[in-house]
Image (tube, helix red, strand yellow):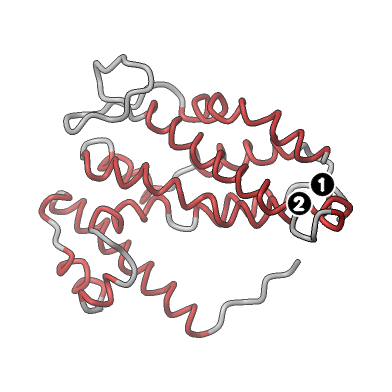
Amino acid sequence: MTTPPPGLRERKKRATREALREAALRLAVERGPDRVRVEDIAEAAGVSPRTYNNYFASREQAIVSAVTADREARIAAAVAARSADVRLADAVTDAVVEQFTHADEDEQRALLLITTNAALRDAFLDATAGIEPPLATVLAERLAERLDGRLAERLGGDAEAPTARVLAASVAAAVRIALEGWLRPAGDTEAGEGPAAGGLVVPAGSPADRLRAALAPLAPAFDAAERG
C-alpha cells in the first residue's frame, strides 16, 4: 500500500513540531532543562505558547521529542520494508533495536540530558507508548497478507486487527521495560525497579541486548499469529 505524500497543512504542522523540538533541545543544552520555560521554547520557535500546547504537553515532552521524533513511524516503516519471507518476530526486533541504538549528534546530546534529569527520564519512557499505533497498522497488514485473508474473511473481515494491536502494545511495553532497566540509577540493583526520582543515572549494559532480551518472550506470540 502506497501512502500519499502529505499536503501543505500537514507539512506546516511537521515543520512547526520540528522547530519546537529543536528549540527545546537547544535551550535545554544551553540553560539546563529546569531553566527552560514553555514560553521560551515557543518564542525561539516563532510561535505562541498556545500553539506550543497544540503539539506538546510539557517542556520535557518537547525536549525528549528530539530523540523520539518520528521513531515510531521509522520502526513501522522498517517492519513494512522487510521481505514477507522474514520471520515477523525478527523483523520487529531488528527494527526496534536499530531505531533505539543509532543516534545522531542531536539525539546523543538529548540522551545525555535525559540520563541526568528525572522528569526527562519519565517523559522518555512514556514516549515508548507511541510505538503502538503505527506498528499495529503495519502488523495488521502483514498478518492479512500472510494469512491470505482467509481468517479475516471467516471471522468478519477484521480478525487480524485485535491481534496486531495486542502484539504492538506488547512491543511498546517490552521496550519500556528494557529502557527502564537501561536507565537504572547507579547503585540501584533491584530487578524491575524503574528510575529513581533523581540523581545521576549510569546506563546499565547494552541497550541492544536489553531490547532483544525484553522482546524475546514475544516471539512465540508472533509465530502463532503468522500461522493463523
Mark 1 secondary-structure assignment? loop
Q: In the rendered image of this protein, does residue 189 appear above or below residue 14?
A: above
Taking the spot 22% from the left edge, 71% from the top edge, the residue there is 42
Residue 5 placement: quadrant: bottom right
Farthest residue, direction front: 155
State the CA–CA distance, disc 1 to disc 2. 8 Å
Q: Horizontal and vertical percent for residue 119?
A: 22, 44
The answer to whether 93 is drawn above or below residue 6 in the figure is above
Rendered position, 55 above or below 178: below
Circle 1 packing at 10 Å, graded few (<14), some (14-19), many (20+), is some
Q: Is residue 210 left or right of residue 182?
A: right
State whether residue 151 is above or below residue 205. below
Asked if marks 1 and 2 touch (Cβ < 8 Å), the reply is: yes
| Residue holding disc 2 | 142
Identify the residue shown where x is 51% and y is 42%: 172
In the picture, measured across the screen, residue 6 lies left or right of residue 22, that is: right
Circle 2: element type: helix
* Residue 152 placement: quadrant: bottom right
Task: Find the residue positioned furthest to the left.
Answer: 35
Query: Where does the image place residue 123, in percent across and percent down from the top left?
Result: 31, 47
The quadrant in which the C terminus is found is: top right
Give the amino acid type for the residue marked by disc 1 in the picture: Ala
Q: Which of marks 1 and 2 is in front?
A: 2
Residue type for callout 2:
Arg
Relative image position of residue 73 (x, y in whole percent): 56, 57
Q: Which residue is disc 1 drawn over?
A: 84
The one nearer the camera, 204 or 173, is 173
* Quarter placement of the N terminus: bottom right
Tell whether 190 sits left or right of 227: left
Residue 26, position as x, y percentages in the image: 24, 58
Q: Which residue is drawn at 61% across and 26% down?
A: 216
